[in-house]
Image (spheres, rainbow, N blue to C red):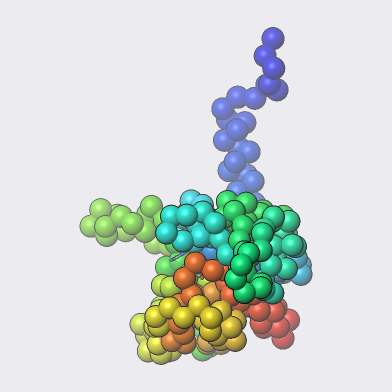
Amino acid sequence: MNQFAQATEKDITRSIVEEFLGDFLSHIESDVIIVGGGPSGLVAARDLASSGLKTVVLESNNYFGGGFWLGGYLMNKVTVRAPAQKIFDQLGVPYKEVPDIKEGLYVADAPSACSKLISAACDAGAFMLNMNKFDDVVLRDGRVCGAVTNWTPVSALPRAITCVDPVAIETKCVIDATGHDAVVANSLADRGLVDLKGFLGMDVDNSEDAVVNNTSELFPGLVVTGMAAATCFGLSRMGPTFGGMLESGVKAAKIAEEIVRS
Ligand code: 48F
């Protein structure tokens, strides 16, 4: 007598195909597409989906989390500075205040923080589309109104071997949360539609406020957050501290929600 319920191979295949395609179909017209599932994009996804907006996260890797799995230098502790520890409180991430230095610097286990943030975005109802590489924007009437995407392994194949056209998802707002590369903003810069400054050298004390202050609508329909905002506006990098990324994601969600509801 087997312990597990009876099912054959076709039942398992059908479950996967029907469920995935059902989710995909219900998101081909979404409220917000977040490109990049690192810390800034995941916080934005959590907040937008919690507000009831139809939210898609496009992530080129198999895993979500971006640079949040490791704090820095292959060491898996992440730091945040006050007031961003409040986001750890919301997520239920345990953390410690770092002793013997200025008040308000906190450290936590990266796997704990990152997994809880991914979980919060999923639980809020965001459609999490991994192994999907952003390829281009949909651009109509002078605004960004969608994202063109392809399976990551297909994107990596040389054109000489295969030419597989991508598909597109329509939306009211795209958030570029792709980190230093700012790939969505760059797709506009390549066409001369925006001018990107490139990020500057490290200056931890000032950079986090600067990233949050510059989290904004770069181009009609395109909001930039996290390190993508630093690349767009010529801001200092901050190295392995994440409060600015988390708070930038909160702000990006507020801006995107205003765009969607306007
Ligand atoms: O780099 P990443 O973690 O971006 P972030 O939210 O946070 C930056 C910090 O991790 C750290 C830092 C500050 O503490 O300096 O670097 O700004 O996450 C970016 C995500 O975007 C994905 C990439 O795999 C990663 O998960 N990504 C990049 N290009 C594409 C993409 C693309 N073309 N399509 C889809 N996803």
The quadrant of the image that shows the N terminus is: top right
Q: Which residue ends up furthest to the front in the rendered image?
A: 100
Q: Residue at x 74, y 62 (%)?
A: 89
Residue nearest the observer in this picture, 75 or 20: 75
Q: Position of residue 201 (x, y in %)?
A: 39, 80
Q: Residue at x 53, y 81 (%)?
A: 205
Residue nearest the observer in this picture, 134 or 22: 134
Q: Residue at x 50, y 78 (%)?
A: 204
Is 209 above or below relative to 57? below
Question: Which image quarter: residue 216?
Answer: bottom right
Q: Position of residue 66 (x, y in %)?
A: 50, 60
Residue nearest the observer in this picture, 109 or 23: 109
The quadrant of the image that shows the C terminus is: bottom right
Compared across the picture, whether 229 is left or right of 112 comes to left
Q: Is residue 122 visible?
A: no
Is 102 above or below relative to 258? above
Q: Position of residue 165 (x, y in %)?
A: 39, 61
Q: Which residue ends up furthest to the top in the rendered image?
A: 1
Question: Which image quarter: residue 175?
Answer: bottom right
Total marks drawn?
0
Q: Which residue ends up furthest to the left in the rendered image?
A: 160
Q: Is residue 227 visible?
A: yes
Q: Residue at x 66, y 72 (%)?
A: 104
Q: Position of residue 146 (x, y in %)?
A: 54, 73
Residue nearest the observer in this picture, 140 or 222: 222
Compared across the picture, whether 207 is left or right of 26 comes to left
Question: Which image quarter: residue 87?
Answer: bottom right
Is 193 above or below relative to 154? below
